[in-house]
Image (cartoon, rainbow, N blue to C red):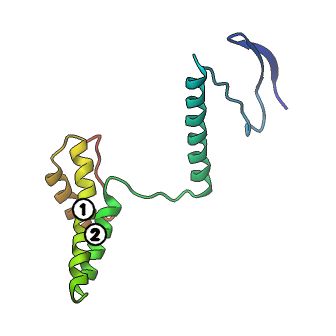
Amino acid sequence: ECALIEEIFVGEDKVLRFSGCKSGEACSIVLRGASTHVLDEAERSLHDALAILTSTVKEPRTVYGGGCTEVAMAAAIDKAAEETPGKKALAMAAFARALRQLPAIVADNGGYDSAELVTQLRAAHAAGKASHGLDMYQGT
């Protein structure tokens, strides 16, 4: 049930517009572009956005970003490496170092002092703030 159904022009095309629908569960999106290439890219982008939205609604849990998971995994691997004998411990420690490089790369790409930010991030995780990550908008 809709409050208004009208025929409107979008460019040179006629379309039906339904407005004031009670349920509000369905909508139409009209894509227009200067060429088929632009239109195809807009359609792909819209499809990707809708797929992400659908996934988020189905599974609302999130993964923390900004190096949070990498620092947490590196700390867990370092702890396990301390209890692991032999060369396997060296490989584990190297992998933990590699994981810690990822937030450093993010900070470098953001134009910040990666050494400072990564050490602050590691200190935050060591203090029990396990959900902390780098904030590239604030540089923290």
Q: Does label 1 or label 2 sit earlier along the sequence?
A: 2
Query: Residue 111: which disc?
Result: none
Q: Residue at the right extreme?
A: 1
Q: Is residue 139 in sight in this rendering?
A: no
Question: Label 2 belongs to which residue?
Answer: 74
Report the residue at 44% width, 58% height from top. Answer: 63
Locate residue 122, reporting x and y percent.
22, 63
The extreme bottom residue here reads 85
Give the camera-side residue of 12 and 91.
Answer: 91
Asked whether, in this view, residue 78 is left or right of residue 52, the answer is left
Residue 14, x across and y down, in percent: 77, 14
> At x 25% / y 79%, what residue is drawn?
79
Marks 1,2: beta carbons within 8 A = yes
Q: Is residue 29 above or below residue 14?
A: below
Q: Which mark is residue 100?
A: 1
The single residue placed furthest to the top in the displayed view is 12
Instruction: Please tell me which residue is depicted at 61% across the width and 32% down the height of the picture.
Output: 43
Label 2: few (<14), some (14–19) or many (≥20) C-alpha neighbours in 10 Å: many
Distance between the alpha carbons at the discs numbered 1 and 2: 7 Å
Residue 94 horizontal side relative to residue 61, left or right = left
Question: For residue 83, which quarter of the picture?
Answer: bottom left
- The image shows residue 9 at horizontal and vertical percentages of 73, 12
- The amino acid beneath tag 2 is Ala
Q: Please name whichever residue, 97 or 126, is drawn nearer the observer in this view of the structure.
A: 97
Q: Is residue 36 left or right of residue 9?
A: left
Badge 1 element? helix
Quadrant location of residue 133? bottom left
* Residue drawn at 29 percent across, 40 percent down: 137
Tell me the amino acid under the disc marked 1: Arg
